[in-house]
Amino acid sequence: METANRNPRIELIRETAVLQIKLLVDGLRDAILIPLSLVAALIGVMRGGADCDREFRRVIKLGRRSERWINLFGHQRPLGNEPTKGSMDSILEQVESAVMEQYKRSPKAPDAADRDEQV
């Protein structure tokens, strides 16, 4: 979204909301990966052999991929070719765009000049 014409307070609130959503998703990912990694390790220990860590390595790969997708602090390489494609950022931008479109179409929404003065 455009940040050039935004009020700094509004931008701070937006960035805080995005971080909170990403932290929540990251926590859910961790809650899923903990038992998943334990089960994968248990399967490997029980099976044995040279490739006993196969399932565990797959969980690690999934964790790395999900880390890039969440991009919690904005330092991960994107999964796709475009900077925000293949990431949670692209989903959040689409949601934000949809919400802003709905807000702009709302009969109660003040025009852009009034909104800037009110904030």
Image (cartoon, rainbow, N blue to C red):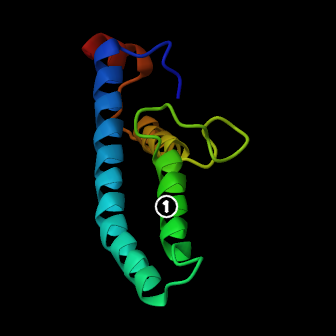
Say above or below: 88 vs 115: below
Q: Quadrant of residue 8?
A: top left
**Residue 2 x/y as whole percent:** 53, 22
Q: Is residue 53 left or right of residue 82?
A: left
Q: Quadrant of residue 84?
A: top right
**Residue 30 x/y as whole percent:** 32, 59
The residue at the point 30 percent across, 22 percent down is 12
The residue at the point 41 percent across, 22 percent down is 111
Q: Nearer the viewer, residue 43 or 118?
A: 43
- The image shows a total of numbered marks equal to 1
Q: Nearer the viewer, residue 88 or 76?
A: 76
Q: Is residue 50 left or right of residue 59?
A: right
**Residue 39 x/y as whole percent:** 37, 79
In the displayed image of the protein, which residue is found farthest to the right?
81
Amino acid type of disc 1?
Answer: Ile
Q: Nearer the viewer, residue 99 or 108?
A: 99
Element at label 1: helix
Q: Quadrant of residue 25?
A: bottom left
Q: Nearer the viewer, residue 111 or 50?
A: 50
**Residue 60 x/y as whole percent:** 49, 61
Say above or below: 17 vs 91: above
In the displayed image of the protein, which residue is found farthest to the bottom?
47
> Which residue, given by chain and number where applicable, does mark 1 sit on?
60
The residue at the point 43 percent across, 77 percent down is 40
